Each structure stands twice: as C-alpha cells, then as structure tokens.
C-alpha cells in the first residue's frame, strides 16, 4: 500500500528494491512496534510512497498504550516502536512475504542480515507472539516472560485486548 504514514523518527531517503519473488528489501522506517514502511522518502516525521509491512507473528503494543510499572504509567507502545527502530537503525532489511492483508499491507518475516527481527521483538519482550499468525514465536515469548525481559516487568493489557482511550 502506498501513502502517507506518520512515523516516530526522522531519517534518510530509503529505497525498496525488488528481491526474490515474495520478498521486499531496502531501508525501513518504523510506524509502530510491529509495522514498517520499506522504501519511499522520509519527510520530517512521515514516510511517503513506500510499502507497508506488518511483522508476521508479532503483536506489539499500540503507540498510545501504557503499561503499569510499580504504579507508574510507562509508554509501552512508544517503547516497543523505539526498540524496533534500535534494531533496524538504518540497515538494509529483507522481508519474506507470508500473506497480504486488507489494503495491500504485506505480512512478512523480516531480517537484518541473518537476525530475525520478528523473533527479536518477541524474545526481548518488546512485543507478544501473535498466535493468529503462527505459533513460531510462543516459546520466545515464554522465555521473555520467565526472564522478565522488556515489558514483562510491567503489568499490561495484551495489544489485541487494548482499546485506545
């Protein structure tokens, strides 16, 4: 899907290059903790003209979602997005398409080099495993929870149950 999307961080001009069939590659900007835009041009805090990619098997906190950390509200949605940005930085990423959602949004498993971005987000507690897509990341979620990684140190509403206020 092509269009204008608000994003969190300013950056560089990006190019999405054709890869193998069912793949996208290029630099990305972060829309939220589970969504990227590959290619296009960045203008101030917006990306224009790129391809929207949702991370397959990942359910990140919504941008406005807060979590409780010892009685203090934490912006867990923004934290999730910031951790995704930290992972990808300005690197070239590659995404393997798994499905296409309404509006032409690509659902994909994405990589920085050999590192699986989807797995990274769940394994470090920056997002939850989305069992509607796959069970692949549930073990990583259980480990992150057991080790109190990322947002597992807080009390939160799962992203799929969160209703923005």
Image: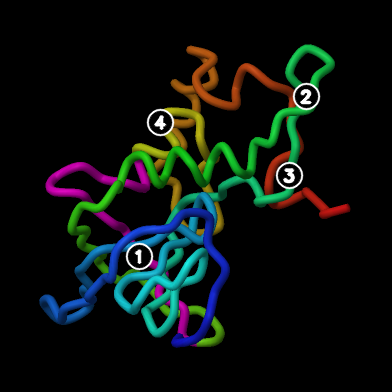
Residue that carries the numbered disc 3 in the rendered image: 65
Q: Nearer the viewer, mark 2 or mark 4?
A: 2
The answer for how far apart the CA atoms under marks 3 and 2 are is 10 Å
Comes first in the chain, label 4 or label 3: 3
Q: Quadrant of residue 124?
A: top left
Q: Quadrant of residue 155?
A: top right
Mark 4 in CB contact with mark 1 (< 8 angstroms): no
Which numbered disc covers residue 108?
1
The answer for how far apart the CA atoms under marks 2 and 4 are is 20 Å
Residue 74 is situated, as x and y percent measured from the top left of the image, at: 71, 29
Viewer-proximal residue, 45 or 115?
A: 45
Residue 157 is situated, as x and y percent measured from the top left of the image, at: 76, 37
Residue that carries the numbered disc 4 in the rendered image: 123
Which numbered disc covers residue 68?
2
Q: Nearer the viewer, mark 3 or mark 1?
A: 3
Comes first in the chain, label 3 or label 1: 3
At a point 77% along the width and 24% down the height, the residue shown is 68
């Amino acid at each position: 899907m092509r269009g204008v999307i608000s994003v969190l961080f300013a950056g560089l001009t990006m190019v999405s290059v054709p890869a193998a069939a069912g793949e996208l590659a290029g630099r990305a900007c972060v829309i939220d903790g589970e969504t990227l835009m590959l290619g296009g041009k960045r203008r101030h805090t917006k990306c224009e003209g790129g391809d929207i990619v949702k991370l397959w098997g990942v359910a990140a906190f919504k941008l406005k979602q807060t979590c409780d950390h010892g009685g203090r509200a934490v912006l867990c949605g923004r934290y999730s997005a910031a951790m995704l940005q930290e992972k990808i930085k300005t690197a070239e990423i590659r995404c393997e398409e798994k499905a296409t959602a309404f509006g032409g949004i690509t659902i994909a498993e994405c990589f920085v080099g050999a590192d699986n971005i989807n797995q990274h987000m769940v394994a470090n507690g920056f997002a939850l495993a989305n069992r509607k897509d796959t069970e692949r990341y549930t073990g990583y979620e259980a480990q992150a929870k057991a080790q109190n990684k990322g947002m597992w140190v807080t009390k939160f509403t799962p992203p799929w149950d969160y209703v923005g206020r």
